Amino acid sequence: MISDEYYMRLAIEEAKKAEQIGEVPIGAVIVQGGRVIARSHNLRETEQRAIAHAEILAIDEACKATRSWRLEDATLYVTLEPCAMCAGAIVLARIKRVVFGASDPKGGCAGTLMNLLQEERFNHQTEVTSGVLGEECGQMLSNFFRKLREKKKNVGQSSN
């Protein structure tokens, strides 16, 4: 059986694609029946669409691949804990399991700020596994934002 770490490495590859085009490095992979049915990365800045998160794009791709909005036997691997919007889409798509890398202290809705994925008042709950390659995923995000701050600082200094 292929491990969660294997699929998280595929999600990290997607995150690196986002970083290469100046996007926040977040990647997602959806697996069903032991095979990858969708993969995506953040495209919010590129597409100037608030909903162009890695998870949403991967869910959309997976629904097209399976010709169903129900992803009941699927597992979503994502490098950063899902936000409220993505957690809602995960529940609505009836994804069985979510595995994420880094926790999100400012927007995480899979256990950090709240846990929408296991909210019993919804008609579907999703299993959650957190912290898979979490240090690596978190470091990638920290490095990205550090470089972004340095770039903004340098631009501000050169205009003086």
Image (cartoon, helix red, strand yellow):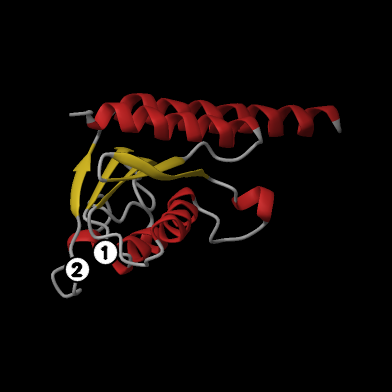
User: Badge 1: few (under 14), some or many (20 or more) residues near its Cα, within 10 Å?
Assistant: many
Residue 94, numbered label = 1
Callout 2–callout 1 Cβ contact below 8 Å? yes
Say which residue label 2 marks. 124
Depth order, front residue of 127/48: 127
Check the image and report above or below for 80 versus 133: below
Check the image and report above or below for 71 versus 99: below
Residue 127 appears left or right of 46:
left
Place residue 19 in its image quadrant. top right
Residue at (25, 34) in percent of width and height: 131
> Which part of the image, by quadrant, shows the C terminus?
top right
Residue 25 appears left or right of 44:
left
What residue type is disc 1 on?
Answer: Arg
Check the image and report above or below for 155 versus 76: above
Percent x, y of residue 138:
39, 31
Residue 42 appears left or right of 109:
right
Percent x, y of residue 75:
27, 47
